[in-house]
Amino acid sequence: MNAPDQQNGDPIVRNIDYIQVLKNRWKEVFLVFMLVLVISLVVTLLMPPSFRATSKFQIKRPRPVMGIGTGEDVVASSNITDNYIPMQYSVLTSSEVLKVVSKKLNLAAEWGMTDDLAATNLAGMIKVSPLRATDLVDVIVSGPDPKLVQNIAKAVPEAYKQDREMRENRLVETAIKSLQDVLREQEDIVNDKMMALKKLIAENDYLPSTMYRSGDNRSVMTGAMEDEDFRNSKAQLMKFEKDEQELAAYVAEVQRLPDDKLMDYVTNSDLLNAEILAADSLRKTYQEYMEKDKERENLKAQNLGPKHPKMVALQETANILKEKLNKELVGLRSSLRSKLEMVTASRVKWAKIVAQKEEDLRRHVMKMPVYEQTSREYDTALDQLKTLDARYKDEIARLRVPRESIEMYDNPLLPTAPYKPDVTLNLAVGAVAGLLLGMGLALLLEFMDTSVKTMEDVERALQVPVLGIIPKNVPILHSAGSLGPDAEAYRILRTNIEFNKKGLEEISLTFVSGSAGEGKTTTLCNLAYICAQGGYATLMIDADLRRSKLHRYYELDNEAGLTSYLLEDYPLEEVIFQTPVENLYVMPAGPVPFDPSGALNSRKFSELLQEVKQRFDIVLVDSPPILGVSDSAVIVSEVDMTLMVVQPRKLPLKALLRQKQVIESVGGNLAGVVMNNVDITSDHQYQYYTTYYSYYSAESGASGGNADASSLKKAERSGKAKELAATQSNDNEDLY
């Protein structure tokens, strides 16, 4: 990551970092992915088949239960709340409902458990899935037996309906009892009011007994000072007053007239028709006389004379009736006077009665509001009772009407195929889970990995430059050819070494590594080859006295070499050999000494380096891993420059710091680092090297092939083709 990226924290770069981690650890990701996928497949195949049946129905809301209050209105005490329907979803899987299902299907006996355990087992098989924004609900039953899940899916709504009806019936009966209690309470109130009114009437004799209600009959007062008895008495008094006035007028008139005028007055006035006059005999005589008079007029009309016998007989009868009528008229005066006296006496009597009653009413007028208040309270209570009774009857009739608690929409069908396991779904989930787990493991390993990964890490930790970046799987160049991007990488390394030298006399250098297999020897051989190709007289000294291998690369014997010079006083010319490559020379390690470190840590080794520096342009010393043995420390202390070979993601950062510490402790000159075996094509940290790498890619195949062919021909000429092939194969295990 470059400086701008570090400063700005570019998210694109961070994403690329994550992608790079996955690229680097694709094997781990793939392994976890395949492992989880296989486990998903095995688990899917081992899972028992499961069938599913679904019943769809609507949950009906119950009728609201009305509670009758003590006031005039019915109070609504609804048993329906906003969360009523969601509550029913829980009721569907309640133990009470599932016990009914268990008993109906005889599941407890079939499963060999109690009803409670059977209900618990059923709850695990049932899923309630409401349909959004509706009262519809799906009851989904899953299990290994298709017929059983169908029967359970049928039984659950039936059991719920049964339980619901039982609960609602109890609620209805409770509501009815409550209504009855309210009605009885109101009846008690009415009875109390009626008894209070009766008591008030009984304690006040001025109030008639009809002043309270009995059923629907009631007498009502018409004035503040009047009641029915008072009105009757007053009416009687007024009648006698009227009769007295009328009789007094008649008496005065008959007393004034003479006897002969009475007949005319009586016949012309309404005296005979007056109700107050008991004149029945007089009226009868007068009517007979008038009839005889009409008969006489009729006979005259028949032209009968006064002497006719009929006329004579009729006249005699008329005279008798007239005489009788005159006598009764004379007696009428005394009769009218007697009648007037009687009416006057009655009028006086009723006047006294009315006056007494009026006085009684005035005396008790202050008690009337109590009576009126009591009467109104009774009326109100009675009206409320009638209202409550009517509404009670209406509510009872409404509650008694049956109502369906559910309405079925889809009856469960017999499942013909299992819905689980779903191989496709399980494998898809397994694939996604495996991929995520693999990626997680890769990131975790990356987080836990403390190894050096980029050249920036190296430069930041060691405070030395990276002088070269060697691509992955670079072969031995003297066998593959000097053309192509691989060779160019070493040319860049050679150039960087030249520019980082502190002086022209610094021509000896060594490559060190923390462990075997980081490509130290290969890097030295290829750099030597490139230097020789550039016209430099180059010497390679194999100072790895424990596992020497340089001689094998050039088909040389190892019977004489560095140890022969150091320990046996061989002449320098007998231990340095010319390679087939022009300007390239090799000093093999020679026989393995008893004490490799002691052999190197000698004055003669130092003199050897000084001697070869006089004869060659570049001296490259191969050494064993610096953290493994002490040989490398001796070599580092003697050469002019030391290059550390680092393979990304191989050694932790602490190992690199330890190598630097060892080099500096012996006075070595750590000139830089060579990043070896770098996958520059996939690692974005090194993508800028792909430009020149691809530039040579068109020629690399041909040149490499020709070089290989040339190497094989050389090996065949020496009769060691098979040995060379085996040597290269074995070296790859140690070098990378």
Image: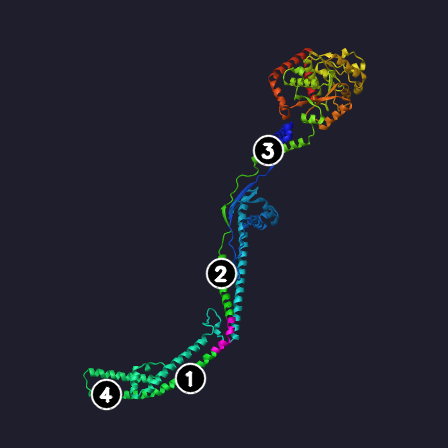
Say which amino acid is labelled 2: Arg
Quarter of the N terminus within the rendering: top right
- Considering depth in this image, is 671 or 590 the residue closer to the camera? 671
Q: Residue under label 3, please give it.
A: 431
Q: Which residues are magenta?
A: 358-371
Q: Earlier in the sequence, mark 3 or mark 1?
A: 1
Q: Residue under label 4, please give it.
A: 313
Q: In the drawing, does residue 238 fall left or right of residue 290?
A: right
Say which amino acid is labelled 3: Ala
Q: Residue under label 2, please give it.
A: 391
Q: Residue under label 1, please give it.
A: 345
Q: Are marks 4 and 3 in contact (CB under 8 Å)?
A: no
**Residue 205 appears in the picture as rendered:** no
Q: Earlier in the sequence, mark 1 or mark 4?
A: 4
Instruction: Point out the frontmost of discs 3 and 1.
Output: 1
Distance in Å between CA atoms under marks 3 and 1 = 129 Å
Q: Earlier in the sequence, mark 2 or mark 1?
A: 1
